[in-house]
Image (tube, helix red, strand yellow):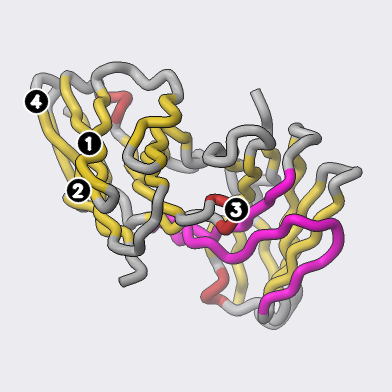
């Protein structure tokens, strides 16, 4: 069983700070990595995806990927209370492109 | 239209009932998915339809029966469910899974 591990949190940061969310995965052959945000009682919403080693920036969000270490992270700059949610890491299976594995999520609390 | 619409939003059913969940998208996405999510757990893949054909069944019990009548519509027929089947059922679609999914708002199912 392929695994995606995340610290469940909660991760608490003050408003305006950088929040750093981390994810490790077991399938060394995985090529595609995704971050979803899920507010309590709502469905997941795609934030961004990353395929290549290094950083990918989109507004206040930066995804970082290190395939050698099997590690992907999400940085949220200038955190806002509205960023308070559970962040799910998802990894796409190497050979079955329709199959994704989700981590259990990290709950982020941004305090005003 | 950039949404995945799920109905009903809430459903309470008895263990002897038959009910159906409905999912609709008009984005021309070629793949549609059913996920099950229990509280504080990640989404678990149940079924994948690609070009209206069932491509993945994650060993889901036969009391769950998916159906894809056309490229825009996905149903999940429920029969003789157990209380442990109570969960949030999420539908998702994608044109290219490499770009992630669009999730619907979910159906919160309670089996009594």
Image-based side of A91 in relation to B112, left or right: right
Closest to the camera, between mark 3 and mark 1, is: 3
Residue B10 bears which disc, if any? Answer: 2
| Mark 1 lies on residue | B110
Closest to the camera, between mark 1 and mark 4, is: 4
Image-based side of A69 in relation to B52, left or right: right
Residue B17 bears which disc, if any? Answer: 4
Task: Using the rendered image of the protein, determine whether residue B112 is visible from the camera's viewpoint.
Answer: yes
Residue B57 bears which disc, if any? Answer: none
Circles 2 and 1, Cβ within 8 Å, touching? The answer is yes
Closest to the camera, between mark 3 and mark 2, is: 3
Closest to the camera, between mark 3 and mark 4, is: 3
State the separation of the CA atoms marked 3 and 1. 33 Å
State the separation of the CA atoms marked 1 and 4. 12 Å
Magenta region: which residues? Answer: A31-58
Q: Hey, which residue is sitting farthest front in the picture?
A: B51
Q: Position of residue B27 (x, y in %)?
A: 35, 63
Quarter of the picture containing the N terminus of chain A is top right
Q: Chain of mark 4?
A: B
Task: Say which element carries label 1.
Answer: strand
Nearer to me, A108 or B69 = B69
State the separation of the CA atoms marked 3 and 4. 38 Å
Labels 3 and 1 in the same subunit:
yes
Q: Is residue A48 magenta?
A: yes
Q: Main secondary structure of the magenta part?
A: strand
Labels 3 and 4 in the same subunit:
yes
Task: Say which element carries label 4.
Answer: loop
Closer to the chain start, of discs 2 and 1, is 2
Task: Using the rendered image of the protein, determine whether residue A14 is visible from the camera's viewpoint.
Answer: no
Closer to the chain start, of discs 3 and 2, is 2
Give the crowd class for mark 1: few <14, some 14-19, many >=20 residues within 10 Å.
some
Relative to A112, say whether B84 is above or below. Answer: above
């Amino acid at each position: 069983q392929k695994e995606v591990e995340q610290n469940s949190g909660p991760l608490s940061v003050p408003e305006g700070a950088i929040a750093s969310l981390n994810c490790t995965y077991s399938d060394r052959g995985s090529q595609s990595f995704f971050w979803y945000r899920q507010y309590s009682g709502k469905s997941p919403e795609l934030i961004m995806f990353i395929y290549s080693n290094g950083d990918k920036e989109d507004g206040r969000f930066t995804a970082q990927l290190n395939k050698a270490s099997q590690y992907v992270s999400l940085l949220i700059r200038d955190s806002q209370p509205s960023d308070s949610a559970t962040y799910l890491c998802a990894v796409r299976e190497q050979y079955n492109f329709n199959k994704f594995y989700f981590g259990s999520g990290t709950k982020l609390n941004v305090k005003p | 239209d950039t949404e995945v619409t799920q109905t009903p939003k809430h459903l309470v059913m008895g263990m002897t009932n038959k009910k159906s969940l409905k999912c609709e998208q008009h984005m021309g996405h070629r793949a549609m998915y059913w996920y099950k999510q229990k509280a504080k757990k990640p989404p678990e893949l149940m079924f994948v339809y690609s070009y209206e054909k069932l491509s993945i069944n994650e060993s889901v019990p036969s009391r769950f029966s998916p159906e894809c009548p056309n490229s825009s519509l996905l149903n999940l027929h429920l029969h003789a469910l157990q209380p442990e089947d109570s969960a949030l059922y999420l539908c998702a679609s994608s044109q290219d899974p490499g770009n992630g999914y669009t999730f619907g708002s979910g159906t919160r199912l309670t089996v009594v």
